[in-house]
Amino acid sequence: MAELVFFSGTMDCGKSTLALQMHHNHAARGRDGVLFTRQDRAGSATISSRLGLQRRADEVDDATDFWAEVVTRRRRGRPVDYLVADEAQFYTAAQVEQLARVVDELSADVFAFGITTDFRARLFPGSARLVELADRVEVLQVRALCWCGSRATHNARTVDGVMVVEGDQVVVGDVGPGAGEAAYEVLCRRHHVRRMTARIARATGPSGQDLLFDDASGSGPGR
C-alpha cells in the first residue's frame, strides 16, 4: 500500500541525509525512484547534506506538476515506484495535493522531507498541507540542539548574528554566511522568543545567563 509520509524537523536534524539514505535503500532493492528538491543551499537541482552527501535531483518550481512528472516517465517505460521530495516546505499546497494524488491513484510512495515552520515560527504552506494530507508525519529523532544545550525546536534567521523577525518567508541561506548576509540558527523556544542567539549569548558573557531567569515583565532580549 503506497503512502505519503512527511519527515519533519528543524535544521540540523538530518532530513536531507535521511532522504538520500532512503533513496539508496529503496534503489538497492531494485525500486525505481525520482528525487526532487527546491532551493537547496548547495544550488539548483541538488540534494545536499551537511555531512557532505550530495546527489543530483530534479529542481521543483511553481510550474512543476508531480502528477504529470510521474505519468510522463511511466509512459516512457519507467515504473517510478517512489518519489523523494526534499525541501518540501517550499512546495505549493497544490503540489502537495498532486503528491497525494500520485500515492492514491498511481500507487507510488512519496517520501517528503522538510522544515515545518519558518523563522517567525509560522507554518510553511507546503508543510501545512503535508500535515493535513500525509498518511504519516514522522518527527526525526536526531535532536538538533540550541546553543544552551536544550532541544532546538525553532529556526531563527539572523543577520550578523542578530535574529530578525521580518522579511520574506523564503530566503535561502546556510549557517555560516558572510557579513550582512542572512543565516539560520536553531534555537529552543525560550531563546527564540527572547531572540537570544549564540552570538548574543557570547557577547553578554556569564551575565547573559541571568537573562534566562528574567521575570515575565518582558525585560529579556527582543522585548
Image: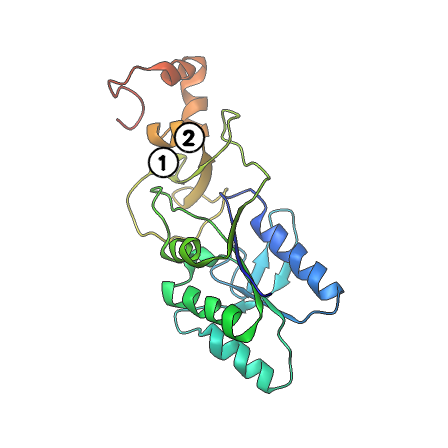
Q: Which residue is mark 1?
A: 163
Identify the residue at horizontal 61%, vertical 86% (top origin).
Answer: 76
What numbered label is drawn on residue 57?
A: none
Q: Residue 159: name its quadrant.
A: top left
Other-residue count near label 2 (Cα within 10 Å), few / some / many at <14 / 14–19 / ≥20:
many
**Vertically, is 219 above or below 196?**
above
Where is residue 139 drawn, in percent x and y?
Answer: 53, 44
**Amino acid type of disc 2?**
Thr
The quadrant of the rendering that contains the N terminus is bottom right
CA gap, disc 2 to disc 1? 7 Å
Identify the residue at horizontal 34%, vertical 27% (top origin).
Answer: 194
On the picture, is 24 further left or further right than 186? right
Front position in the image: 211 or 142:
142
Q: Which residue is mark 2?
A: 197
Other-residue count near label 1 (Cα within 10 Å), few / some / many at <14 / 14–19 / ≥20:
many
Where is residue 125 drawn, in percent x and y?
Answer: 36, 56
The reply to whether the C-beta atoms of the residues labelled 2 and 1 are less than 8 Å apart is yes
The quadrant of the rendering that contains the C terminus is top left
Front position in the image: 104 or 161:
104
What kind of element bears circle 2?
loop
Where is residue 172 drawn, in percent x and y?
Answer: 43, 53
* Mark 2 or 1, nearer chain start: 1
Front position in the image: 4 or 153:
4
What kind of element bears circle 1?
strand
**Vertically, is 67 above or below 53?**
below
On the picture, is 132 further left or further right than 37? left
